[in-house]
Image (tube, helix red, strand yellow):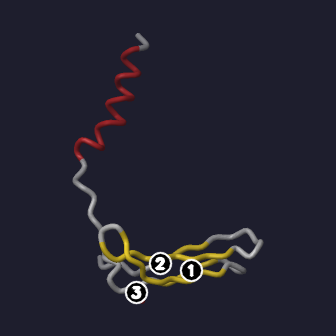
Amino acid sequence: MTRRPSLAVLALLVAPAVGSPLARPVVGIDDVTAWHAAPSEGVNVSLSGAQGAHGQALRVDFDFAGTAGYAAVRRKLPL
């Protein structure tokens, strides 16, 4: 009886991976200026371009300066 629930859970975990298409980027990082830093107060963030393993990458440098907070990057996506 315990085997059926575990098989059902396994099927639920594997099903999305089997039917999902290959991952593909929504937008490229060719234009670094399209990305904007969105840090919380007291956090410093700088963005720059860098060479990645498969082309251009976005480099994010951040400094929390001894505070708690977050460092995010944003870009408008074409919908």
Disc sitting over residue 38 in the figure: 1
> Residue flagged by tag 3: what amino acid is it?
Ala
Q: What whole-number distance in Å separates the C-alpha atoms at marks 2 and 3?
A: 9 Å
x and y, in percent, of residue 25 in the image: 30, 68
Vertical placement of residue 25 versus 41, above or below: above
Q: Residue at x 39, y 14 (%)?
A: 3
Mark earlier in primary sequence (2, 1): 1
Task: Choose between 43 and 75: the one closer to the eye.
Answer: 43
Q: Secondary structure at mark 3?
A: helix
**Cβ atoms under marks 1 and 3 closer than 8 Å:** no
| Residue 3, placed above or below residue 67 | above
Q: Where does residue 70 sit, x and y in percent of width and height?
A: 63, 70
Q: Secondary structure at mark 2?
A: strand
Taking the spot 77% from the left edge, 72% from the top edge, the residue there is 66
Q: 35 or 16, which lies in front?
A: 35
Asked if labels 1 and 2 touch by Cβ distance under 8 angstroms, the answer is yes
Which label sits on residue 15?
A: none
Instruction: Say which quadrant the N terminus sits in.
Output: top left
Q: In the figure, is residue 77 to the left or right of 43?
A: left
Which of 9 and 65 lies nearest the eye of the viewer? 65
For this orientation, the residue located farthest to the top is 1
Q: Residue 34, labelled with which disc? A: 3
Residue at label 2?
A: 74
Label 1 – label 3 distance at C-alpha: 13 Å
Specify the quadrant that holds the C terminus.
bottom left
User: Residue placed at 35% from the left, 78% from the top?
Assistant: 29
Q: Disc 2 and disc 1: Cα gap in Å? A: 7 Å
